[in-house]
């Protein structure tokens, strides 16, 4: 969510397709995106005709856990933002995401002037670490403030 807000990506009235239903990514995102007045479509690895849903997305968030599963054939004309949360190993044992990054970036370059896609590695992973540090800092300061109030 912080990435979307940082880059001023509007969610209100946008269709967001989430592929993945984990307790740490998919399910929490549904509620957070609904709070931003997005239309949320939740899919998973068992969704039939997945391209019917992904092709409707303004924002596509993947956390399916399948290396390079999302190819350019899954991307619709309105898709301008892809957030790849997947961390996988490809056939060469290299770290990759759920999105076939090369083919999708090529599609984006040919189709749009402005678009966003997170790389793997180097995208959501470091952002997760940064937000963890941020939240620990907030918790520390909240704890210190509570101690100061008690001792006054």
Image (cartoon, helix red, strand yellow):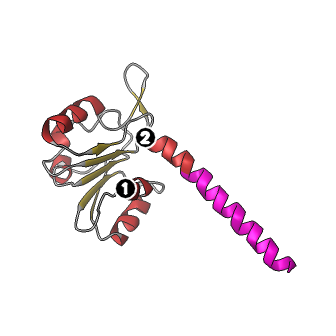
Q: Position of residue 4 (x, y in %)?
A: 37, 56
The quarter of the picture where residue 13 lies is: bottom left
Which residue is at the far top?
92
Instruction: Tell me the residue at 70%/64% (across/down).
Output: 141
Relative image position of residue 35 (x, y in whole percent): 37, 71
Indicate whether residue 47 is drawn in magenta. no
Image coordinates for residue 152, horizontal then vertical, percent:
85, 80
Q: Residue at x 43, y 22 (%)?
A: 93
| Part of the protein shown in magenta | 131-152
Q: 28 or 104, which lies in front?
A: 104
> Which quadrant is home to the N terminus?
bottom left
Q: From the viewer's side, name the closer residue of 61 and 14.
A: 14
Residue located at (49% from left, 46% from top): 127
| Residue neighbourhood size for the residue with mark 1, other residues' Cα within 10 Å, grouped as few (<14), some (14–19), many (≥20) | some
Residue 150 inside the magenta-drawn segment: yes
Residue 149 lies left or right of residue 38; in this view the side is right
Q: Position of residue 115 (x, y in %)?
A: 25, 45
Viewed as shown, does residue 63 lie left or right of 71? right
Q: Which residue is mark 1?
A: 4
Q: Nearer the viewer, residue 49 or 120?
A: 120
Relative to residue 98, is residue 144 depicted above or below? below
At numbered mark 2, what does the secondary structure look like: helix, strand or loop?
loop
What's the distance in space between the residues labelled 2 and 1, CA to CA? 13 Å
Residue that appears at 44% across and 33% down: 121
Residue where numbered disc 2 is placed = 123
Q: How many marks?
A: 2
Q: Is residue 44 above or below residue 107?
A: below
In-front residue for pair 150/63? 150
């Amino acid at each position: 969510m912080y990435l979307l807000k940082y880059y001023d990506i509007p969610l209100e009235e946008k269709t967001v397709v989430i592929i993945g239903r984990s307790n740490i990514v998919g399910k929490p995102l549904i509620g957070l995106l609904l709070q931003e007045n997005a239309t949320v479509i939740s899919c998973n690895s068992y969704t039939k005709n997945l391209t019917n849903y992904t092709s409707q997305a303004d924002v596509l968030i993947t956390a399916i856990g399948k290396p390079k599963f999302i190819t350019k054939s899954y991307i619709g004309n309105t898709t301008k933002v892809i957030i790849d949360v997947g961390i996988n190993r490809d056939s060469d044992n290299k770290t990759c995401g759920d999105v076939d990054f090369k083919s999708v970036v090529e599609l984006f370059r040919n189709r749009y002037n402005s678009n966003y896609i997170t790389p793997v590695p180097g995208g959501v992973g470091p952002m997760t670490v940064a937000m963890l540090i941020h939240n620990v800092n907030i918790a520390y300061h909240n704890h210190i403030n509570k101690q100061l109030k008690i001792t006054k």
